[in-house]
Image (tube, grey):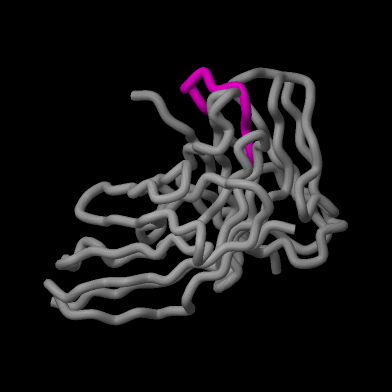
Amino acid sequence: DGGITQSPKYLFRKEGQNVTLSCEQNLNHDAMYWYRQDPGQGLRLIYYSQIVNDFQKGDIAEGYSVSREKKESFPLTVTSAQKNPTAFYLCASSIGDRAHEQYFGPGTRLTVT
Amino acid sequence: GDSVTQMEGPVTLSEEAFLTINCTYTATGYPSLFWYVQYPGEGLQLLLKATKADDKGSNKGFEATYRKETTSFHLEKGSVQVSDSAVYFCALSRAAGNKLTFGGGTRVLVKP
């Protein structure tokens, strides 16, 4: 079955450590996105990538980094510079010319203590 | 900039009740409008969409009509089920852009 995979579902880290969240898609989609979801605040765009080896900052990119070395993969690193990293992180993808119709993965809940 | 405002939840209903979730937007031009649904512990799923004024999106018994004059895209369902318990997000996208702007989400709880 085609879809988006995020792993792990739950992730725990100590403050000061970098952590990388995985996102893989086998939908052959060109574009991929990372969102952060906090209670009552909806989704906020962190980074997005329209094509391999290219990505752009979203609305809240500070403290995060990404790479897009393969079409299928768009890992997100939450660095120690991110002041409030505890959140639910959602990855999405879309066909290049239908970028407004995004398909979402199941999410990773990151807890930093 | 673009923004989406939805009614705050939680909305608690009994099974078979009528559901309305209000959504209004601010955007220049003619954005496309969407409703996404998030079931507990899962990612978001596209529920329905409308791409131009007066279009009605519908899916799984849910409907929403793109009202340009009131900049609204209210979600309705005539008879909810317990399985409709979820968080519902209204969103917009510029036709030529690649960003979705989301509202804050509305949690709906349907009791048997």
Depth order, front residue of A22/B55? B55
Q: For residue A27: magenta?
A: yes
Depth order, front residue of B78/B9? B78
Question: What is the quadrant of the N terminus of chain B in the image?
Answer: bottom right
Q: In the image, is residue B71 above or below residue A64?
A: below
Depth order, front residue of B18/B65? B65
Q: Position of residue A33 (x, y in %)?
A: 64, 39
State the extent of the magenta-drawn residues as a range.
Answer: A25-33
Question: What is the quadrant of the C terminus of chain B in the image?
Answer: bottom left
Query: Can the viewer see residue B43 in this picture?
Result: no
Q: Is residue B8 left or right of residue B62?
A: right
Specify the farthest residue to the front: B69
Total numbered labels placed on residues in the image: 0
Q: Residue at x 80, y 50 (%)?
A: A61
Tell me where residue A57 sits by quadrant: top right
Q: Residue at x 48, y 79 (%)?
A: B8
Q: Position of residue B19 (x, y in %)?
A: 26, 72
Tell me where residue A15 sits by quadrant: bottom right
Q: Residue at x 63, y 62 (%)?
A: B26
Q: For residue A3: magenta?
A: no
Q: In the image, is residue B13 above or below residue B44?
A: below
Q: Is residue B73 left or right of residue B15?
A: right
Q: Position of residue A105 (x, y in %)?
A: 48, 41
Q: Is residue A50 left or right of residue A64?
A: left
Query: Can the viewer see residue A107 in this picture?
Result: yes
Q: Residue at x 66, y 31 (%)?
A: A74
